[in-house]
Structure formats: C-alpha cells, structure tokens
C-alpha cells in the first residue's frame, strides 16, 4: 500500500521513479559517480525530512532523517515496521539471521545479547584503545 501522510518521490506505482527519464538519469549518474548521498540530500531538501519512494518491483520505502521518526521506528514501535520477506530474503546471504536482518522475537533476542557489548563503559574503553593506537 502507498504510505499516507508523507510526501511521495514522483514516480509510477510499479516502476517507481524509473518511468521519468530525467529522474532515472540522475539516479544512474549519482550511482556511477558515487554521489548517492548527495542525491538523497537533494530529495530531502525538495520533499522534507521524511518521504516515501517506490523502486522497481519492491515494496514502498520510507526515507527519513528526522530524529523523532528514527526513534519512533527503531525503539518505540519497532514491531510496527517489519523488514518483511523481500528485505530479509534479498539480504539473507549477506546478513544471515543477524540483528540487522530479522524481526520479532529473534530481533529482541539478538538485541538483548548484543546490548551488553555496547555499554557506555565498554564503549569508552574501546575508544581509548583505538585512540592510543
């Protein structure tokens, strides 16, 4: 379903922005020049801190740089934003069943196990070890 209450990057419901040759040209050019960050920044400047986009044969993507939205998605309502089978199956060979590629109970288990590695004390100790090298 098309997301509601956010600006939509112009495009076709199935082809995404690729139906528009000028947008396709900008996307391909940015990829070839390794300037995707600049392209996303320009999209944010045109559409705001959060927008939706559709890429060819993929589900809708929500793109945000708003800290409140990130907190909402990543901590307060994580279960409402599943990665889904398209994402997990596409990246399974690379990420496996790790924390970045799972949802639900498996994600909570991975987060609980890994949270012990990211305490403030351990982080400070690691930073000092890196700085001293």
Image (tube, rainbow, N blue to C red):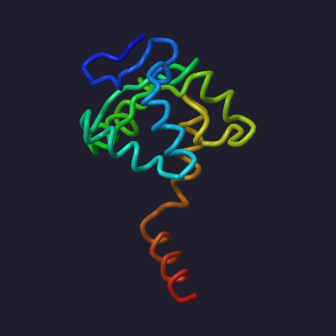
Q: Position of residue 21 (x, y in %)?
A: 47, 25
Most foreground residue, 92 or 119:
92
Q: On the rendered structure, is 49 left or right of 24?
A: left
User: Residue pushed farthest right?
Assistant: 93
Residue 12, above or below 132? above
Q: Position of residue 55 (x, y in %)?
A: 51, 24
Residue 122, above or below 53? below
Most foreground residue, 2 or 78:
2
Residue in the picture at 36% in, 22% down = 10
Quarter where residue 90 is shown? top right
Most foreground residue, 70 or 107:
70
Give the quarter of the figure containing the C terminus. Answer: bottom right
Residue 46, above or below 111? above
Residue in the picture at 45% in, 71% down = 121
Q: On the rendered structure, is 65 left or right of 122?
A: left
Q: Position of residue 33 (x, y in %)?
A: 53, 52
Q: On the rendered structure, is 96 left or right of 20?
A: right
Give the quarter of the figure containing the N terminus. Answer: top left
Residue in the picture at 49% in, 34% down = 25
Most foreground residue, 94 or 12:
12
Residue in the picture at 34% in, 46% down = 41
Q: Position of residue 69 (x, y in %)?
A: 30, 37
């Amino acid at each position: 379903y098309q997301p509601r209450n956010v600006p939509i990057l112009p495009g076709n419901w199935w082809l995404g922005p690729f139906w528009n040759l000028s947008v396709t040209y900008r996307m391909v050019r940015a990829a070839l020049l390794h300037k995707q960050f600049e392209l996303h920044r320009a999209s944010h400047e045109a559409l705001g801190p959060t927008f939706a986009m559709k890429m060819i044969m993929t589900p809708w993507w929500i793109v945000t740089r708003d800290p409140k939205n990130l907190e909402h998605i990543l901590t307060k309502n994580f279960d409402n934003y599943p990665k889904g089978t398209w994402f997990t199956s596409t990246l399974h060979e690379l990420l496996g069943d790790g924390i970045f590629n799972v949802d639900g109970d498996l994600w909570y288990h991975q987060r609980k196990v890994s949270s012990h590695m990211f305490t403030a004390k351990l982080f400070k100790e690691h930073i000092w070890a890196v700085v001293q090298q």
